[in-house]
Image: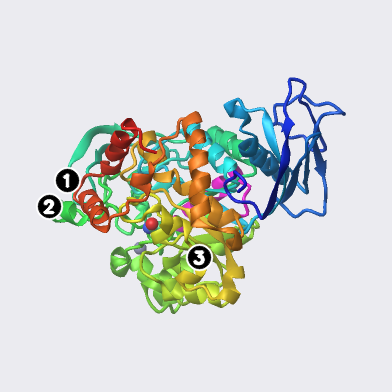
């Protein structure tokens, strides 16, 4: 067993060790600024550029005399170094690298992690840490959820109120979907355009593309609080501090924490294009995520502007109005060489351009999403049961992530080629800081990496578990609050149901507390 997550495409352990001595130096065809090792022509870590390797692929050969890396691009060279990092355990004071050969390449092109910074804001240093963890796992897409109802988190120069007003709420709902409890007090934060450039550069050095998500037309309450004319009716409402839920809805008589902008006013369309133009200047990725999920249509049904567009363009209904709205954005993005991504609900429109990329998330199976991928459409798989990392382990234990296969979610074997890849989602309504964030993503990120990077034929739960046990020294070294086995793999169904039920009744931090307790008792 090679001591590495994600498991490489091919590997062979050999007899003997390479000894890292004080004079250990590198000789590299690539610049590799993150490799803090002295360079010398006779360095015993030899990194060669070899164009016979595909993007991100590499070989690593450790003999008693020399360590040789071959890669076609910088990302491949870095991934080889990440593999060497885990095999050598250099950071843990080890100096004997076991001899081996590895030949490695990615299974999917899109290996993503998302982070919702609207509901809770983590800030630059936490995001960099997240990117470092992704880099270690050979994950290469950071899907950055920067806007939602409860906070707008990116500076837009043309519309300064988006952050002046839209980034601050006056209170925050706590204790879960059924709760009317709140924490009073302003909660806010946002990234300046300079911050964004810094993070994009940081990610890029680590082979990570950042795909921004700016939600249109729904999940726009923060934007509407800043610019009320964006909505069908100009109501002056603050940025919501409630995330939602049926009980607060009934008790408080409020249900508009998910607000939708008007799809019928040309002024709204101009706003959308202006925002997209500024965002596209900041993010070089050839993709743009517009969200598009959970778009309530009730305001559109009553709005003369929306109804006029439906009538003028002979649209079937409000669903097709969203299709029409999305097609206009898609054309605008096409002019910038970018593809539109939206959550799978956008496929409900009958008139939507087929070149959209759908992200399949819904807990219920969606015929539209499955038809899309099985008729040549591109898709990113974030199926709830496996990749919603904000859910309790009681509901979705680690195995749900590890055992993932797109064919279990309606993708025909011959259409797996249309799957760009997989992505873990981290919605943060009930994730208020690092302790809980870490718990939800570790060790799920390791399981995701194995789905995303490793060849399906090489996957084995038993083998993964053993490698994960070895990996735990890194959680400790990097001070990551990982979920111990008893939390990430709750065996007993009744116990699991209880955890989930308590979560639903408002104990959003039950597993955090349980984990703390188990760690104190020394459980792994
Ligand atoms: C989603 O979780 N509403 C995309
Ligand atoms: Zn309208």
Q: How far apart are marks 2 and 3 (CA)?
A: 41 Å
Q: Report how many numbered discs are placed on residues in the image.
A: 3
> Furthest-left residue in view?
251
Judge: label 3 CB < 8 Å from ligand 1. Answer: no
**Residue position marked by numbered label 3 in the rendering:** 405
Instruction: Mark 1: give few (<14), some (14-19) or many (20+) Cα within 10 Å.
Output: some
Can you give x and y, in whole percent of width and height, for residue 131 in the image? 54, 39
| Label whose residue precedes the other's in the sequence (1 or 2) | 1
Q: Quadrant of residue 318?
A: bottom left
Residue in the image at 50% along x and 62% along y? 381
Q: Which mark is residue 180?
A: 1
Of circles 2 and 3, the one toward us is 3
> Furthest-front residue in view?
15
Q: Are marks 2 and 3 in contact (CB under 8 Å)?
A: no
Q: Is residue 511 left or right of residue 146?
A: left
The span picked out in magenta is 268-287
The answer to if 273 sits in the magenta stretch is yes
Figure check: 229 above or below 62: below
Residue in the image at 73% along x and 48% along y? 58
Whether residue 178 is visible here, answered yes or no, is yes
Instruction: Mark 3: give few (<14), some (14-19) or many (20+) Cα within 10 Å.
Output: some
Q: Which colour scheme is used?
A: rainbow
The answer to if 386 sits in the magenta stretch is no
| Label whose residue precedes the other's in the sequence (2 or 3) | 2
Task: Give SS at disc 3.
Answer: loop
- The quadrant the C terminus occupies is top left
Q: Which mark is residue 251?
A: 2
Q: Nearer the viewer, residue 126 or 251?
A: 126
Q: Are marks 1 and 2 in contact (CB under 8 Å)?
A: yes
The secondary structure that dominates the magenta segment is: helix
Of circles 1 and 3, the one toward us is 3
Q: How far apart are marks 1 and 2 (CA)?
A: 8 Å
């Amino acid at each position: 067993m090679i001591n590495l997550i994600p498991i490489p495409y091919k590997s062979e352990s050999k007899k003997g060790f390479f000894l890292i001595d004080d004079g250990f130096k590198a000789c590299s065809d690539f610049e590799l600024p993150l490799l803090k090792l002295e360079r010398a022509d006779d360095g015993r870590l030899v990194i060669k550029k070899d164009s016979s390797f595909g993007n991100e692929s590499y070989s690593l050969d450790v003999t008693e005399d020399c360590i040789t890396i071959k890669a076609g691009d910088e990302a491949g060279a870095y991934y080889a170094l990440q593999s060497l990092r885990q095999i050598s355990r250099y950071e843990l004071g080890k100096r004997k690298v076991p001899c081996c050969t590895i030949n490695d390449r990615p299974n999917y092109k899109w290996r993503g992690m998302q982070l919702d910074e609207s509901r809770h804001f983590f800030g630059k240093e936490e995001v960099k840490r997240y990117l470092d963890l992704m880099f270690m796992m050979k994950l290469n897409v950071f899907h950055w959820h920067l806007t939602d109802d409860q906070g707008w988190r990116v500076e837009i120069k043309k519309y300064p109120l988006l952050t002046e007003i839209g980034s601050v709420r006056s209170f925050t709902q706590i204790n879960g979907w059924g709760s009317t409890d709140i924490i009073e007090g302003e909660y806010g934060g946002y990234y300046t355009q300079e911050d964004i450039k810094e993070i994009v550069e940081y990610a890029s050095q680590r082979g990570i593309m950042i795909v921004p998500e700016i939600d249109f037309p729904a999940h726009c309450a923060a934007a509407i609080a800043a610019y009320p004319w964006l909505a069908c009716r100009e109501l002056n409402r603050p940025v919501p501090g409630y995330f939602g839920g049926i009980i607060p809805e009934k008790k408080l008589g409020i249900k508009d924490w998910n607000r939708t902008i008007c799809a019928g006013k040309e002024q709204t369309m101009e706003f959308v294009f202006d925002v997209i133009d500024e965002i596209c200047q900041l993010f070089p990725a050839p993709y743009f995520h517009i969200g598009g999920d959970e778009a309530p249509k009730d305001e559109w049904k009553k709005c003369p502007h929306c109804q006029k567009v439906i009538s003028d363009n002979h649209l079937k209904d409000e669903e097709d109005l969203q299709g029409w709205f999305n097609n206009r954005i898609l054309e605008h993005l096409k002019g910038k060489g970018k593809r539109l991504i939206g959550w799978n609900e956008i496929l409900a429109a009958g008139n939507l351009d087929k070149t959209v990329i759908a992200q399949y998330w819904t807990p219920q199976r969606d015929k539209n999403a499955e038809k899309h991928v099985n008729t040549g459409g591109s898709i990113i798989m974030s199926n709830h049961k496996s990749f919603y990392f904000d859910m309790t382990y009681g509901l979705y234990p680690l195995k749900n992530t590890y055992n993932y296969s797109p064919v279990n979610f309606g993708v025909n074997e011959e259409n797996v080629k249309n799957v760009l890849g997989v992505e873990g989602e981290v919605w943060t309504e009930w994730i208020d800081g690092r302790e809980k964030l870490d718990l939800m993503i570790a060790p799920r990120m390791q399981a995701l990496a194995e789905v995303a990077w490793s060849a399906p034929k090489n996957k084995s739960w038993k083998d993964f578990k053993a490698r994960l046990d070895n990996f735990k020294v890194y959680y400790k070294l990097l001070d990551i609050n990982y979920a111990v086995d008893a939390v990430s793999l709750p065996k007993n169904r009744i116990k699991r149901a209880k955890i989930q039920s308590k979560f639903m009744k408002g104990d959003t931090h039950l597993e955090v507390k349980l984990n703390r307790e188990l760690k104190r008792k020394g459980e792994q």
